[in-house]
Amino acid sequence: MIRAGIITVSDKGSRGEREDLSGKEIMRLLAGIGIQVETTAIIPDEADRIKATLIDFADHKQLDLIITTGGTGVSPRDLTPDATLKVIEREVPGMAEAMRRASAAITPHAMISRAVVGIRGNSLIVNLPGSPKSVRENLAVILPAIPHAVEKIKGDESECAQ
């Protein structure tokens, strides 16, 4: 069983000025492949808060999968990838590249996504954009690979090519 958490990075969402539709969409999509979300957080676009929440979810809650939504673009307040890079131990660039490639077929704005995917301890951390539509489009690309990635991160030594 994969234990997951969702972190919504949004100034307005953290102040209660905007409903978290992206987090709900992530929950729905994960449930579709049997992943239960154990915990969620809605935090402001502040690097220290993002880092602290990622560390809490990975190190203390020991979640297998942590998905962030929001803050992946190029505006001055888009700090999620920067904070993620400071807490991960290894990147998984293929997943981020696959999301950008698929999204670029839909919109040229995908080129300005700075989303990253990486590993901290036994947790896979995935940055997603902040809109429900973008969440659907990006998560659909990597969803089939997530269970296998989590198994490998947790130490599964079985052969991949069978």
Image (tube, helix red, strand yellow):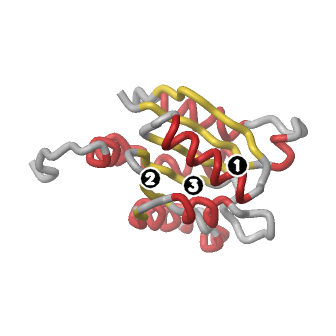
Cα separation between marks 3 and 2: 13 Å
Residue named by callout 1 = 131
Which residue appears at 63% of the width and 61% of the height?
83
Q: Earlier in the sequence, mark 2 or mark 1?
A: 2
Residue drawn at x 49%, y 62% is 102
The amino acid type of the residue labelled 3 equals: Asn
Q: Quadrant of residue 98?
A: bottom left
Q: From mark 2 to mark 1, how far is it between C-alphas?
A: 25 Å
**Image location (x, y in percent) of residue 128:** 59, 53
Q: Which residue is mark 3?
A: 127
Of mark 3 and mark 2, the one earlier in the sequence is 2
* Amino acid found under the numbered disc labelled 1: Ser
Label 3: state its secondary structure. Answer: strand
Q: Is residue 121 left or right of residue 13?
A: left
Nearer-the-camera pick, 33 or 14: 14
Secondary structure beneath dot 2 equals strand
List the residue tagged with mark 2: 120
In the rendered image, residue 34, in percent from the top left (x then y), is placed at 41, 26
Q: Position of residue 11 (x, y in %)?
A: 83, 49
